[in-house]
Amino acid sequence: MRSVKYLPVFFLLLLTGCGASMLSGSAAYTDSMDGILVTSYGSTLYIYDKDQADSGKSECLDACAEKWPPLYVDSAAVLSRDFSRIVRPNGHSQLTFKGKPLYLWSGDRQTGDRAGDGLNNVWHVVPR
């Protein structure tokens, strides 16, 4: 398993209609592993129960966003299928899946880690 020390969250994302999603300007992809949505680095993506689907906003701000970094997407990226974006208070676009904002968990240290799943009964991996 490859160790991931830190994943930059300013991804420039271009999602295709295929199973994988290409990150524009980098060699990274969004994909699934064992039925769970992950980055190409194998970093697990999460959703937050307090976020309302299709509300256009995130409830994870400030200290929350430091622990749960948003998965940012280029505002000009062409998205398809179940992916969309919201604009965070800082003006950056965050990727959503089925209307729910996507996050990484700062406690995940290695590829495939899912330490954030079930945390406080409000954070969950994203089934794909």
Image (tube, rainbow, N blue to C red):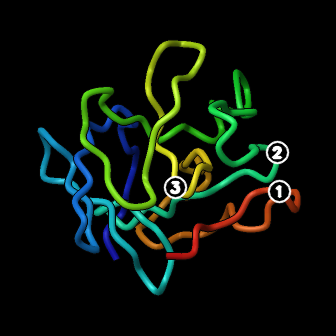
Q: Nearer the viewer, mark 1 or mark 3?
A: 3
The x and y percentages for residue 57 are 66, 30
* Quarter-of-image position of residue 24: top left
* CB within 8 Å, label 1 to label 3: no
Indicate the amino acid at tag 1: Val
The residue beneath circle 3 is: 97
Q: Secondary structure at mark 1?
A: loop
Name the residue at 32% across, 60% down. 30
The residue beneath circle 1 is: 122
Residue 48's place in the image compared with 55, above or below, is below
Indicate the amino acid at tag 2: Lys
Instruction: Give the Cα separation between the discs numbered 1 and 3.
Output: 17 Å
Residue 93's place in the image compared with 42, above or below, is above
Mark 2, other Cα within 10 Å: few <14 / some 14–19 / many ≥20: few
Name the residue at 52% across, 59% down. 45
* CB within 8 Å, label 2 to label 1: yes
> Of marks 3 and 2, which one's residue comes earlier in the chain?
2
Indicate the amino acid at tag 3: Phe
Q: Count numbered badges in the picture.
A: 3
The residue beneath circle 2 is: 50
Instruction: Give the Cα separation between the discs numbered 2 and 1.
Output: 7 Å
Instruction: Give the Cα separation between the discs numbered 3 and 2.
Output: 15 Å
Name the residue at 46% across, 86% down. 34
Name the residue at 83% across, 56% down. 122
